[in-house]
């Protein structure tokens, strides 16, 4: 595991233990995707409102703890600020609020909204003849929402090549309505599709490279493991969906993370 | 009023390139001059109201002034969460212009009737809610509000009230001050029926084209009288009750039922007592109250 990604996961575990909040397995499944996307985006943590920045929308807002830890790692704010995660009066809620957290472009939480908002951003930038790009990260559970496909259809119709959708294919919906052929569906809806290992930063970055003369939105299916990094999460991801470790469990999870058990 | 919508957007687009239109496959033929002149600023995204609203929010986030337009129930009742989250919570100001609310599509049945729009949108923080009753009011309100960066809702109607009234966003209009013990409060095109109803009766009439923010100043002027809200939608009564509590307040509006009789707007209004005769009877009942 990439050393940065391991450090980010360690922060996720510690902050969740301290605060009693956070969706750890889903945050763990997107760490590499977030690190990769910020690796290709034009952005400046010292100037979150820089007018030439690319834009990122975390559509699966419940991965906020992972998102905050990545933004802190990039230098948007000190990691200590996130210690108040979910506390009364904190800026760092369990879903991100753009008016409270530097680097957050859109406040999210309800699933199925991100692609359409990101498509609107991409359409506006296309109108302005801007080369700025827009990225959004959605979950596979979220892909049960009809608005995901409605928005993709519109984005393809409008030829929004400036829009890139990262699809966190972590198998979270195996107990409800699985989508076994995400890449095929995304392709059928008009996207240029890449399939990558969701825990390989290099592979994801390569898939996110800008394409000259594109005429369609890009979708990157990140085959991921919910809770990647700790075998405890993998053995029972539903029990840990929204659960924080106690101090003894934290010690065990840190040990697992450091032994690279998965 | 829809033709006026076309005219005023053509006028505004000529001087403001930040104005963009997102339509849900309605009024497209009517706006053919706009699409010919500004093809890049007109998007007929199809029948996908939720996406229309969220995309408009994304466009607003980049400094544009989008106007979403489609039929009222589909973009207000269906897309309420998109308006709540992507527009109001995020503070991405868009304009929503609807047609067909209340019983404008009387003949289409309950799926196409929409009388909750004003009330449910009034509940969202930061939302401006307007029900113009004439072309003049709609154009004036759109001109003054479309570029203020706030979420704004305009409900346009087939019907008009036929009065030439002063228009200023957020201000009620005293249409008739008879020094009477009863004041009829109303909004939108139904003012036409109200004025017919009160002919020869002792009643004041105060009219609102803006339901949020509601003009509480004008309400307070008449707060000592018996207030009767006459409206073919929800929203005005609830706003008055919330904004000026403790007044003597009556309501002559919609029954708790689907009003599926087909026919035309006036047929439905007559069936539920919102024709001039029904309203006149309601005013008389309130006059008789202690």
Image: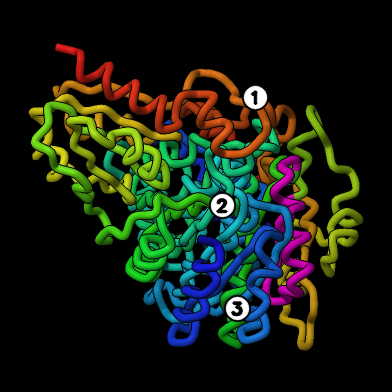
What residue did someone put label 2 on? B99
Dots 3 and 1: beta carbons under 8 Å? no
Q: Residue at horizontal 62%, vertical 58%?
A: B52
What residue did someone put label 1 on? A239
Dots 1 and 2: beta carbons under 8 Å? no
Q: CA distance from mark 1 to mark 2?
A: 48 Å
* A209 on left or right of A49: right
Task: Pinpoint the chain carrying mark 2.
Answer: B
Q: CA distance from mark 3 to mark 1?
A: 49 Å
Q: Please, is residue A107 above or below residue A245 in the view?
A: below
From where the camera sits, is residue A20 visible?
yes
Task: Residue B188: give x, y in percent of width and height.
Answer: 39, 46
Q: Please, is residue B274 above or below residue B8 in the view?
A: above
Q: Please, is residue A216 above or below residue B262 in the view?
A: below
Task: Residue B230: give x, y in percent of width and height.
Answer: 34, 32
**Number of the label disc, if any, that sits on residue B41:** 3
Task: Residue B121: give x, y in percent of width and height.
Answer: 43, 42
* A204 in magenta: no
- Secondary structure beneath dot 3 equals helix
* B93 on left or right of A155: left
Earlier in the chain: of badge 3 and badge 2, it is 3
User: Which is more foreground, mark 3 or mark 1?
Assistant: 3
């Amino acid at each position: 595991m990439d050393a940065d990604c391991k450090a980010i996961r360690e922060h996720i575990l510690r902050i969740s233990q301290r605060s009693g909040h956070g969706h750890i397995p889903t945050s763990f499944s997107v760490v590499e995707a977030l690190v990769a996307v910020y690796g290709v985006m034009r952005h400046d943590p010292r100037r979150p409102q820089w007018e030439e920045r690319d834009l990122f929308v975390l559509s699966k807002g419940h991965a906020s703890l992972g998102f905050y830890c990545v933004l802190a790692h990039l230098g948007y704010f000190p990691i200590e600020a996130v210690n108040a995660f979910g506390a009364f009066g904190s800026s760092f809620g369990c879903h991100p609020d753009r008016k409270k957290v530097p680097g957050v472009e859109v406040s999210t939480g309800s699933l199925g909204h991100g692609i359409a908002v990101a498509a609107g951003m991409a359409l506006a930038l296309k109108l302005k003849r801007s080369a700025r790009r827009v990225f959004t990260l959605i979950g596979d559970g979220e892909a049960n929402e009809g608005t995901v496909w409605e928005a993709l259809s519109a984005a393809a119709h409008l030829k929004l090549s400036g829009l890139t959708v990262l699809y966190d294919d972590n198998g979270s919906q195996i107990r409800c309505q699985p989508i076994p052929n995400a890449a095929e569906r995304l392709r059928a809806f008009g996207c240029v599709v890449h399939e990558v290992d969701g825990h390989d930063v290099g592979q994801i970055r390569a898939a996110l490279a800008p394409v000259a003369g594109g005429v369609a939105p890009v979708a990157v299916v990140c085959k991921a493991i919910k809770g990647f990094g700790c075998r405890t999460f993998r053995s029972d991801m539903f029990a840990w969906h929204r659960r924080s470790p106690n101090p003894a469990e934290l010690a065990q999870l840190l040990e697992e993370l450091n032994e690279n058990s998965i | 009023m829809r033709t006026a919508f076309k005219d005023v957007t053509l006028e505004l687009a000529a001087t403001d390139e930040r104005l963009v239109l997102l339509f849900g496959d309605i009024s497209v033929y009517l706006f053919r001059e706009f699409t010919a002149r500004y093809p890049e600023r007109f998007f007929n995204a199809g029948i996908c109201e939720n996406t229309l609203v969220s995309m408009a929010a994304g466009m607003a986030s980049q400094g544009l002034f989008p106007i979403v337009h489609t039929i009222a129930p589909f973009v207000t009742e269906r897309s309420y969460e998109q308006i709540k989250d992507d527009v109001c919570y995020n503070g991405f100001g868009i304009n929503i212009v609807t047609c067909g609310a209340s019983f404008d599509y009387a003949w289409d049945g309950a799926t196409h009737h929409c009388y909750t729009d004003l009330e449910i949108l009034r509940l969202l923080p930061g939302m401006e809610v307007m029900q113009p009753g004439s072309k003049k009011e709609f154009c004036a309100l759109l001109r003054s509000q479309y570029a203020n960066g706030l979420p704004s809702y305009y409900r346009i109607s087939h019907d008009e009230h036929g009065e030439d009234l002063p228009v200023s966003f957020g201000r009620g209009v005293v249409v008739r001050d008879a020094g009477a013990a009863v004041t009829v409060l109303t909004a939108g095109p139904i003012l036409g029926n109200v004025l017919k109803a009160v002919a020869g009766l002792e009643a004041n009439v105060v009219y609102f084209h803006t339901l949020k923010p509601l003009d509480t100043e004008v309400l307070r002027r008449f707060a000592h009288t018996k207030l009767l809200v006459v409206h073919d939608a929800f929203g005005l009564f609830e706003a008055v009750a919330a904004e000026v509590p403790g007044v003597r307040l009556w309501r002559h509006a919609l029954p708790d039922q689907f009003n599926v009789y087909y026919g035309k707007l006036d047929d439905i209004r007559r069936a539920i007592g919102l024709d001039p005769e029904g309203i006149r009877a309601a005013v008389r009942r309130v006059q008789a109250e202690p």
